[in-house]
Image: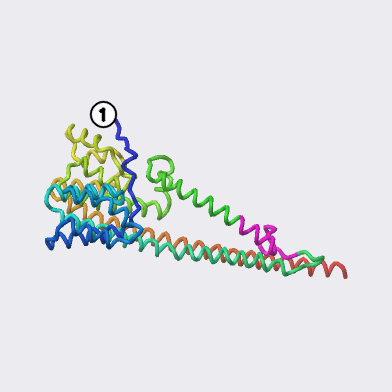
Amino acid sequence: MSEPHQNPRIWLVNRKLPARLQADLLGRLAITLQAGIDLRKAWGNEVKRMPARWGAQLSLGTDKINNGEMLSDALAHTGLFPPLVIGMVAVGDQTGKDVETLKQLSRVINHAVDTTNHLRSVLIWPAVQLVLALLVVGVLILVSGTIELDRGKPLDFIGLGLVGASGLKMYGLLLVVMFVILLGGSRLLLAGWRSHGVIRGLITRLPLLGAAARAGEAASWSRAASLAAGAGLDAGRLVSLSGSVAPGLAIDPLWINERLLAGDTLTEALQATHRFPLALLEGLAVGEESGEVSEVLGRLSDQFADNSRKGFEAAAKAAGGGVWLFVAGLVVLVIFRVFSVYVGMIQDAVDKI
């Protein structure tokens, strides 16, 4: 049996419509449909309510709704929603559980947004500390140009030949180059994380960050799989929709179906990929045995999300500590440079006597 291969299209998650707006729209649609309001009227209200930036694109689905097509068809036609949303709404359309599905999606998306915002707030402070440290270096370089030693030679605090206004300009240029390199490197790391090559292997071995990233990915996959299992989707569609929100865990659904036809359970098929954490596989096995796959995956998702949050918080604290160690080292370096310079000046004066 061939090894699983990934379909790159499964990674194409449309992010044009912000997630919070997606959650709000789906939640309002659930409320209006539950109240018995016609879908065409409810959709028209959402088009009017949507900010102008998105309203025109959302209106592309109006003809679909007016022609009596499914809500999922309209959402797909706008190009504003990711595969998970479209796929789950389609299931709701087909099973008559559209209101329940819309509510679940709204809750899941809002939870994901809240988690992301929390992580961003945690990581902002180390970034601010780093910026402040770099500003301190810039101030030292500028001030160094105003302090002259014997023979008009400026005092080089840092010891890199960067002094005064000219040194500050060079320092700023170096920072710009470093920022561009870091930006390109982050994109490379993101692409590498979504693949299964050397870069992903290196990231997973990073202290704190590696475990936190793996837990966050497992949380996203488990949450999506819980929704899919609760809607009664087959294993192929379950892994397809779950992989769309966790590209690093995306598996070809055809390969999964082959394994299932060969007699494997879903747990055994996923285990054969060597991509999923043991805790997820063990929980999924329990869910398959008990017939409560959706419930078990939902609980696992919460556990993974909590582990990811704690991991990123620990990484942020470590990064902040690293920044302050850098500042402390810089202070010690400046003191040493100033001390050595003045000791040299005193020694020269003594020698002349």
Q: Quarter-wise, where is residue 124 in the image? A: bottom left
Helix, strand or loop status at disc 1: loop
169 relative to 249 in the view: left or right: right
Q: Is residue 187 visible?
A: yes
Amino acid marked by disc 1? Met
Q: From this viewpoint, which residue is outermost toward the top?
A: 1
Q: Is residue 286 visible?
A: no
Tell me what residue is drawn at x 23 percent, y 49 percent. 63
Give how far across and how far down residue 91 sits, in percent: 17, 48
Give how far across and how far down residue 82 sits, in percent: 29, 49
Asked if residue 155 is among those painted magenta in the image, a careful observer would answer yes
Q: Which residues are magenta?
A: 154-173
Asked if residue 141 is among those painted magenta in the image, a careful observer would answer no
Foreground residue, 214 or 144? 144
> Which residue, given by chain and number where applicable, does mark 1 sit on?
1
100 relative to 312 in the view: left or right: left
